[in-house]
Amino acid sequence: MPLCYAGGVAPHAVGHGLPARINPLDFGPLGADWTRLPRREAQRRAATVFARWLLLLRGLVGSQHVPFGPTAETAVGRVLRELTGFTTGADHLADITIPQVWHALRDPTDDLIAACRYATAQHFLDDTRPVRDALGALVTGHLAGLFDAPTTIDVDWSAPIQSLSLSRLDPLGDEAVGVALTCLNSWGRAMTDPAASSSPSPGDSSSAETGGGGLRIVLRDECWKQMRLGVDAVKSLDADLRLSRRDGTVQIVVAHKPSDMLTVGAAGSHAVAIAKDLLHLCATKVLLGQDDRIGDDLTDLLGLSPLHERIVTDWATAGRGRALWLVGHRTAKVATLRTHTELPLLETSHALTPVARTSTSADGADNADGADGAQ
């Protein structure tokens, strides 16, 4: 990615045959200095970590079209606490991976069976088989070896930009990429969690709700692949957006058309209802040029006036970088211009046009053959 190299950062790529491995069950900064934490702070951090992991595992199991009900949540939650040592009050919590969770469910301890209120081990195994099979498919399937081992990349989160690319996984299909996005998003959120920097020092009984540090922009491309995994994957994305203020992040979700957000489930389903809420949850909406049919869809979803719909389907399609911006209750016609310095950094159509040709339109906006590199 030229933009990363211009910022002095080498992008990280995840895929088979590459050295990068990411453990979505990493503690992140919340796992630092555990032995020196006051009891209340340790419990707060543990609750945050286990809740994030449960949300991730719920989404991963749901991606296999397996329900993750209260029984599964109890069993998996107990396994997470046992494997890390939290149940026994360990001073240092152990790092764990998804395969360890899978194996713990396949070979339950007596304490796990009793804690989940099963009479026998066989009863436990029968009830948790769908969850085990779903996790097993992730451990032994197309993504085996990528998200089921300790993390091998060292990301400098203080750098001006970072890129974690999953493009090498495209041949595996949209579902595999969606699962990978779910893992990557959960891991990225863990590694940049501001809660650790705002935690009280030993002996301080106070607890801050928001973390320090600079503002972070998170760009989510192809998010529809994650959302199509099911309602739990949609809930995971919804949680990230809703917590952006607390986490000090600006979340940018990129979609090609409104139907990307609405194909997450059957019409009228809970998943579609959440997806529609996501559209309204976004404080700023940038609507680039679309054809008349998609313009009608946007009008239905966002309540555009006839004038605003014409801006999207007419004016915005006549020049690159043109869009209707919806900022709260305000609207604006905006033409984004790329300078000659920015053009080679943001161009993504090199495969179609080896040498990008630029021209100047009558209104002075820069144009280049091919697709916009950034939206």
Image (cartoon, rainbow, N blue to C red):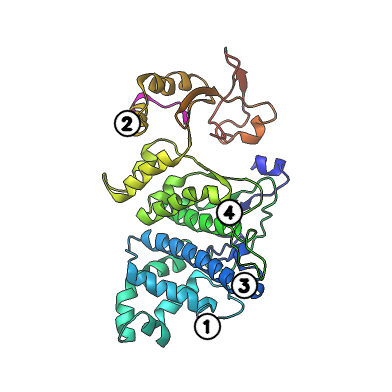
Q: Between marks 2 and 4, how big is the CA–CA gap?
A: 37 Å
- Report which residue position mark 2 lands on: 300
Mark 3 or 4, nearer chain start? 3
Residue 288 image point, x, y percent: 47, 28
Q: Amino acid at mark 2?
A: Asp
Residue 315 image point, x, y percent: 46, 18
What residue is shown at x 62% (from left), y 62% (from top)? 199
Dot 2 alpha-carbon crowd within 10 angstroms: few under 14, some 14 to 19, many 20 or more: few
Q: Is residue 307 above or below residue 251?
A: above
Q: Is residue 121 left or right of residue 21?
A: left
Residue 38 got which mark? 3
What segment carries the magenta color?
A: 286-293
- Report which residue position mark 1 lands on: 88
Quadrant assignment, res 142: bottom left
Q: Is residue 190 above or below residue 122?
A: above
- Report which residue position mark 4 lands on: 210
Q: Is residue 287 above or below residue 126?
A: above
